[in-house]
Amino acid sequence: MFHTLRKIVIVLFFLICSGAAVGVGAVVYAKRAVFDPIMVYLEVRKLPKAPGALEEISGQVVKTMNDYSLQLKDDRRLLSNFRLVGLAPLDQKRMTNETELVLQDGIETRFRQLVLSNQVRVRVSYLNAQRTGLGLVYTGTTNVNVTLVQEGLAKVKREFLHGLPRIEQYALVRAEHKARERKLGLWKEGENSPNP
């Protein structure tokens, strides 16, 4: 009798524990978005660390190009060309239907709104002798690179993040996750969007 009762208690205990584990698993699965920042952080940790502090150049944007590039006139009246670092270029050859062309125009318009004729600060990750380079662009405290990604108007190319500090890498990857989750811009369902 005692052995039978013991077996019943063990089986009941096992069933209760399994049910609790399934319940906890269901709750964790339902609330998985809470863990997204941790997953993004772990993804960024795989990327190489930046070598050091980034140089900054400030000035007024005098021209924008359609591939997330701008021309900047600094305080010494020198012109520099910068491409927004970390962003995948749009594959213009693949953009063929009306929706994609409208989206491309929207991307160019929003980029111009953010930077053209504005005072910006560029945290330079690369600059050559011809004053052409890559960098993070800020208007005030707004990171333009992150803003475009968060609005679904740009995709992050992980291979282009190598020269950035971890905090900037994290901000870009997190912004892309948010845009993809909300299906904004380049992440809309059914749209043949360009891949980075």
Image (cartoon, grey):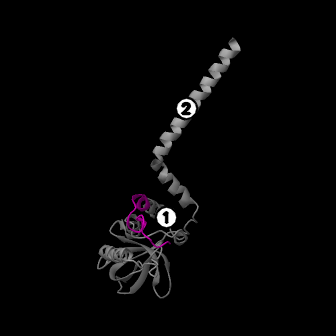
Total tally of numbered discs in the picture: 2
Query: Which contiguous range is marked in magenta?
Result: 178-196
Tag 2: Cα neighbours inside 10 Å, few (<14), some, or many (≥20)? few
Q: Nearer the viewer, residue 57 or 3?
A: 3
Question: Residue drawn 63% across and 24% down?
Answer: 11
N-term mark: 1 or 2:
2
Query: Which numbered tag is attached to residue 169?
Result: 1
Vertical order, 143 against 38 (above or below): below
Q: Position of residue 40 (x, y in %)?
A: 50, 57
Q: Quadrant of residue 185?
A: bottom left
What residue type is disc 1 on?
Answer: Gln
Q: Residues within 10 Å of mark 1 (few under 14, many from 20)?
A: many
Name the residue located 60 percent from the left edge and 25 percent from the top edge. 13
Q: Assign the N terminus to one quadrant of the image.
A: top right
**Badge nearest the viewer, 1 or 2:** 2
Circles 1, 2 touching at the beta carbon (< 8 Å): no
- Rendering coords of residue 8 (x, y %): 64, 19
- Distance between mark 1 and mark 2 Cα atoms: 40 Å
Above or below, 36 relative to 148: above
Residue holding disc 2: 19
Residue 82 place in picture, x, y as percent: 43, 80
Question: For residue 16, which quarter of the picture?
Answer: top right
- The kind of residue tagged 2 is Gly
Which residue is painted at 62% across and 20% down in the image? 9
In the rendered image, residue 80, in percent from the top left (x then y), is placed at 41, 84
